[in-house]
Amino acid sequence: MKTFAKSAVLLALLAALISFAKFDNCRVNGWSPPGDYIHACYSDLPALFGERGLIKHSWPYASGTNAVEYPPITGVVMWASSYLVSDSGNKYRNYFDINAILVALLFIGSVVLLKRMKPELWYLFPVAPAVIASLYINWDIWAVISALAAIYYFDKLNYRKSAIALGISIATKFFPVVLLLPIFLIFIRKRKIKELISYLLVTTGTWLVINLPFIITTPTGWLRFFKLNSERAADWGSIWHALDIFGFKVNNLNLITIIFFALGALAFTLFVFGITKIPSLASIAFFIVAIFVISSKVYSPQYVLWLTPLAVLAMLDKRDRIDFWIWQFAELIYHFAIWQYLASISGAKFAIPAGAYAFAILLRISALTWFSLRLMRKSTPKFGPQNLEFLSGVGQGYA
């Protein structure tokens, strides 16, 4: 193994083992409330193994009412790994262990790739406490590594590989779809319209090749992911849920979240066009994903796995590390707050009340917003005549 990758593998492996130890209480004593919340070791891996019929090897999209709530690649991983579970012993623990090994391997791969992309700050990803705490909650790392690959190949100008990787990522978890906005803006700034059209066609084609078999054979089960997200009320971790707790119920939530995200996307677009030098995708991807999770109707603790590697890529130099740790501290507070709040509504005697949980939500969102704005401010020149000249040039260039 090359020395370059060896340190990344070792540090990521150490982080994966520490994370595994965090979940061991539930491995030993079982995943049942309020214990799994009190010990902050809840995981969707064993929970959905039973709830979605995977313990019986049921096809994940066969049921219109109980299909898995994820895109096809994640669903197939969930289903295929169920066949690796031994008939003897604790099936739930075995299923968790099998998927945890796969997650750990992909996490190590993500760290190695991130070191190649950001050699001076890569280590912040595997040592981030909120990342370590969240690694085995869900299958998100499957989409993270493919999204990182899409960014890596895009900035290497290998657009076809990037588009294929992004199509795979969107077919794994839906969040990478928002990366299409910065990709679109970069192509526009480079005046590469043919490359933009080709990129969109390859991404869409890749996504369709993966999704069409499910759309044709089990359309209702496949559609459940989109239906659940459309019908979802203000859910855990979102600003809308915090407002609900404080007594401010938001009506027409779907429309409001769309408007909220659209305004954020508009601000992001102005930011991208305000950068004098055409940015790399790696340097701006974090901001659109941050806007997405801030405006979303739900924020699960493992979403920090989406944000953290992108934040590392967006950081300009080592001076940004203090800001990074302040944000990560807020993420860690939220991580434990949600489990203790869920413990309280599951019958635990010692937990936190709803108001404290809502405060943790607002603290996390505020820290993420503050950190994003700090990085964005450092990426753009102070407003002045040069900005007006730049905007004028943009207008002339696209007239």
Image: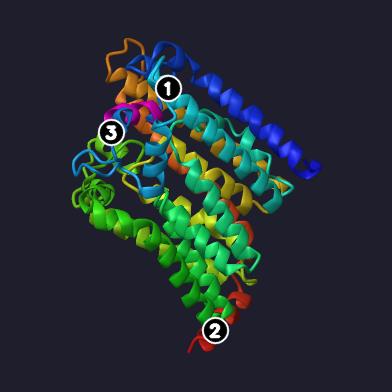
Answer with mark 2 or mark 3, whichever residue precedes in sequence: 3
Answer with mark 2 or mark 1, whichever residue precedes in sequence: 1
Mark closer to the observer (2, 1)? 1
Q: In the rendered image, which residue does mark 2 sit on?
A: 392
Image height of 257 relative to 361, above or below: below
Q: Main secondary structure of the magenta part?
A: helix
Image height of 374 relative to 244, above or below: below
Q: Residue at x 34, y 41 (%)?
A: 238
Distance from the alpha carbon under mark 2 to that under mark 3: 56 Å
Distance from the alpha carbon under mark 3 to that under mark 1: 18 Å
Number of residues whose C-alpha sits closer than 10 Å to that of mark 2, classed few (under 14), some (14–19) or many (20 or more): few
Distance from the alpha carbon under mark 2 to that under mark 1: 66 Å
Q: Which residues are magenta?
A: 45-51
Three-letter amino acid code of the residue under disc 1: Ser
Q: Residue at x 64, y 51 (%)?
A: 315
Three-letter amino acid code of the residue under disc 3: Arg
Residue 161 in picture, x, y percent from top left:
57, 63
Q: Residue at x 31, y 45 (%)?
A: 297
Disc ID at residue 52? 3
Residues 251 and 235: in front is 235
Residue 56 in picture, x, y percent from top left:
29, 29
| Residues at circles 3 and 1 in contact by the CB criterion of under 8 Å | no
